[in-house]
Amino acid sequence: MLKIDNLSKIYRVGTFGGQELHAVDQVSFEVEDRQIVSLIGESGSGKSTIGKMILGLIPKSSGSISFNGTETSSLKNSALKEYYRKVQGVFQDPFSSYNPIFKADRVFKLIREEFFPSVEACEWDEKVENALKAVGLNPENVLNKFPHQLSGGQLQRLLMARALLLDIKFLVADEVISMLDASTRIDVLNLLADLKSRGLSILFITHDLCLGYYISDQSVILYKGHIMEKGTTEKIYSNPLHPYTRMLMASVPRLDKKWEPADVKWKDEQPKHKGGCAYAERCPFVFDKCRERPLLVEITKGHSVACWRRSEIR
Amino acid sequence: MSLQVENLRVHYQTLQGNVQALEGVTFNIADGEIMGLAGESGCGKTTLGYSLIHLTLPKKFIGGCVTLDSQLLPIWDAEKMQAYRFKKVSIIPQYAMSAMNPTRKIGRMTLELLESRGIRFNDILPEFKRRLELVKLPQDVLNMYPIELSGGMKQRVVMVLSTLLNPSLLIADEVTSALDVSTQQAVAEMLVEFREREFVKSMIVITHDISILYQIADSILVMYAGRPAEKASTSVIINSPLHPYTRLLISSLPKSGVKYSNQRLSGIPGNPPLLLDPPTGCRFKDRCPAAFAKCSQEPPFIEVKQGHQVACWKESGKHA
């Protein structure tokens, strides 16, 4: 459904834009029909940048993003509008996604004006009501209210209902639950799983490994814009191969296991070699070859890792 | 007992009336205990933390007493508290990364901070350097501006500064929330190490992330809508909680190895009550699956087992 090939995003930084920052560096992965793919990484890993490039919010530097075989960056006018009928995003902070001066259901009105000008009012109301029910909201409780009168979970679900009105096929969910409380976040997560059974594909961007495991079919682990490891969620979680993935798995706070005594404590960063493995600066297994960039190599079917010492680390 | 809080009540003054942010909070912390304070946003956990050190408007002290090392803390009087702040009670604020003065080098800022408290910087300097070394910071940071440090480094400097005078009580407010998982672990373990080395006697760790508390806390106090719901040792809260709210909260957390297709978790329906005009009786009763007639009266926060306190009629009835 969505294919990302060698995607890169380079920002110019420094006083006169003299330096380059590779926010996303030659990333390739695919999202198939009815699949939830989670994009996992720490801050600065480029996970949100990828989401924004898919949604066309920022231009890409090189590589390709194709949706059902068409390259998205070349879309213009009506073709682009058709694209947004099928692909939508929901973001981290539900409170700042709304204009506080207007009522929250204005987002539905805008969708109607933009995409469905010919639909009758009563038919539209019914459509809105169905979308709200699909995300588990009671229309009476949320329509005609201002954003400050609704909770974060309700606002987040309203945004998903807005996306559903468009009969979308692909949803970019960028940290949608990190702002929500524990008691409501699981409901939003279950909602994503339900949407999948309605035929949606979802790119689930998160920093939380447990949430990624709970919901996704495929996982992609990112570090500083490079893919470290990707594959089916089960394989990655049961048998993490990359040193970075292992470090992540070990340091995630869990409810069923106490931390092992950490050896990762404030490791001095090693000098970075341009073009080498991005994780070399923190990796405990680093050796000379890490100055070259390792390629993603498939270890078993549906499980690839980018590490020179992949065969030794077992 | 290092810290005893009895029936603490703190309200926020607003134009609409008093918001009852803390109502009858009672708990004890033993010497060397790390107590986690958990709950949803708006349950009063940060208000409780700040009330113990800096209670100012719009927060208003209504009643209760706080005893630290058998000394009554005058938390209602911001002036008198000056003598205790930083020396006896200290805090690592939530905004630790932006807590430092951007126009001063870190060494100079520390000097000004200490001298304003009547302590000579040079007396403390060797210990300060030693502790910076302990958290793996080079001594050069004394000659650096905060902007030159990374987020994790700033957090560590603030942690060392906050505990420099060996306070009896340290309040750590969401110290790990803004950090990456690997840094999170190191910061959390450093808190434990500060306790081991007796830089601080006891600690309150405020966080919404219960899995962090499971790693480092000795006991957990769960709050709901300004009231304590349950306090017990960490393993009891995680593995065999008694209060319905704690149970639902723990069961809604995705554990690693749980997938929605195998085991679908569920959240807690409903929202916490507004504290401007809170419901009478148990504040959880509208969302509670086990609510019954008696819940319209306020449940007492009582000890049902050794070191296990619960505010729920179902439980207190059983053991009465």
Image (cartoon, coloured by chain):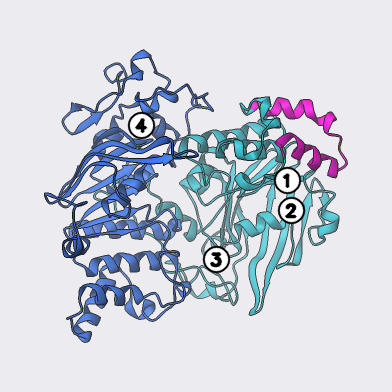
Magenta-colored span: B105-134
Q: Amino acid at mark 3?
A: Trp
User: In which chain is the residue bearing label 1?
Assistant: B
Residue for badge 3: B313
Give the Cα distance between marks 2 and 1: 7 Å
**Taking B283 as reference, is B287 left or right?**
left
**Position of residue B239 measured from the top left corner of the image (x, y, whole percent):** 46, 46
Asked if badge 1 and badge 3 are on a common chain, one would say yes
Residue A66 lies, in percent from the top left, at 17, 48
| Circle 3 Cα neighbour tier, 10 Å, few/some/many (<14 / 14–19 / ≥20) | many
Q: How many marks?
A: 4
Q: Mark on residue B90? A: 1
Query: What hue does chain B carry in this figure?
Result: cyan
Residue B258 figure quarter: top left
Disc with the residue nearer the chain's start (1 vs 3): 1
**In the rendered structure, does residue B10 fall within the stretch colored magenta?**
no
Q: Quadrant of the N terminus of chain B?
A: top right
Do the residues indicated by labels 3 and 2 lie within the same chain of the protein? Answer: yes
Residue corresponding to mark 2: B53
